[in-house]
Image (cartoon, helix red, strand yellow):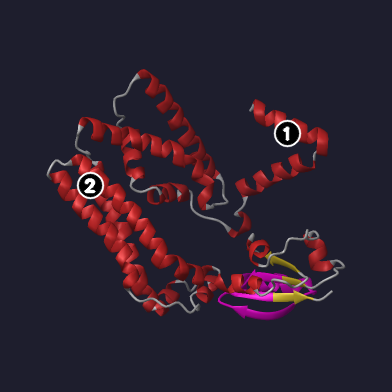
Amino acid sequence: MVTLGLWFAVDLMRNGPTFAVAFFWRQVAMLTTEDAGHGGFFGYHVVVLLVGCFPASVFAVQELLKPAASSSELKDHRQWMVVLFFVVLVLFSLVKTKIVHYSSLCYSPLTYLAALQLERIWVRNEAFGWSRFALGILGNIIALVVIAVPFIGMDIEKLRELLAGDPFAQANLGAEVDWTGLEAIAGLVLLGSLTAAHFLHGAKRYRSSLVVIFGGSALFITTTLFFFIRNIEAYSQRAAITFFEERQGERCYVTTKGYKSYAPWFYARTSQTMPPEEVLFRGPVDRPVYLSCKITSVDEVIALGTFSEIGRNNGFVFFKRDP
């Protein structure tokens, strides 16, 4: 708190209250609204950490429920790690703006807690305990979902029916994505690793079981990224990214409305400082202004009365405002 206070004091003396006030209201917006279109249920970050940090998350839960014996020095450090973990988790569970990386500070205490259980198993050559079955249940669910996704992608119309209440998601599914079925290999890698680890544990080869679980998980992540990332990107944002890339080299402003993204800066290569939003939308401008919005925000853009639609693709609608 002292460090933070000194930093704010220096900024206040040099630049006045502008940043401090904006920072305060930004925190209020995150806490009270689903800002930038990112919302979710209260336990959102519990799921993110449990699945995203698998298999370490399972061992961390085991450590929270039944701590491994350790020295007094480790117990003090463990206590601070538990405090850090729950402060971050509870805080961002209360915050209504839900974004995956908001709970990333939990990664360090979570993996530390998991390491205490892994040390118990490795050094003392002890059985996993109930975590063996939790690993199997959660891991198999993850593996089966990954195996199923490419086959669902081959028959996307059925998924479209389930998303009838979300026009943007429905439009996203109109992207041209080539699913071959080979993508299921990623899920099979995890499934095979879990099966091998289960039998190694049954043979009391606990260390070998750990190596297979974590080694197989690393290979699973790598193969999942290789097979899935381009296809998922095609649904989620490729239309917008292509639009931004087409603006490269043009003297213009590129922005978004209804969602926040750094993509225009990176893909359109717009290095110049942009005017405030009010100027871009209604004020005098010296160059064309291009705008990307989701299909759910079209009426808001039209209501501005200054933009003309120039195209739409996979849930994104693109507008232009001439100088």
Residue on which disc 2 sits: 133
Name the residue type under label 2.
Phe
Pick the front one: 317 or 95: 317
Name the residue type under label 1.
Phe
Q: Is residue 16 visible?
A: no
Residue 231, percent from left and from top: 45, 70
- State the count of labels: 2
Q: Secondary structure at mark 2?
A: helix
Q: CA distance from mark 2 to mark 1?
A: 49 Å
Report crowding for label 2: few under 14, some 14 to 19, many 20 or more residues within 10 A (C-alpha).
few
Q: Is residue 133 above or below residue 224?
A: above
Q: Hey, which quadrant is residue 121 in on the image?
A: top left
Q: Which numbered tag is attached to residue 8?
A: 1
Residue 270, percent from left and from top: 72, 64
Q: Which numbered tag is attached to residue 89?
A: none
Classify residue 211 as left or right of residue 17: left
Query: Which residue is found at the position 41% from the left and 51% from the top?
Result: 52
**Lower position in the chain sequence, tag 2 or tag 1:** 1
Q: Which segment is the magenta one?
A: 291-318
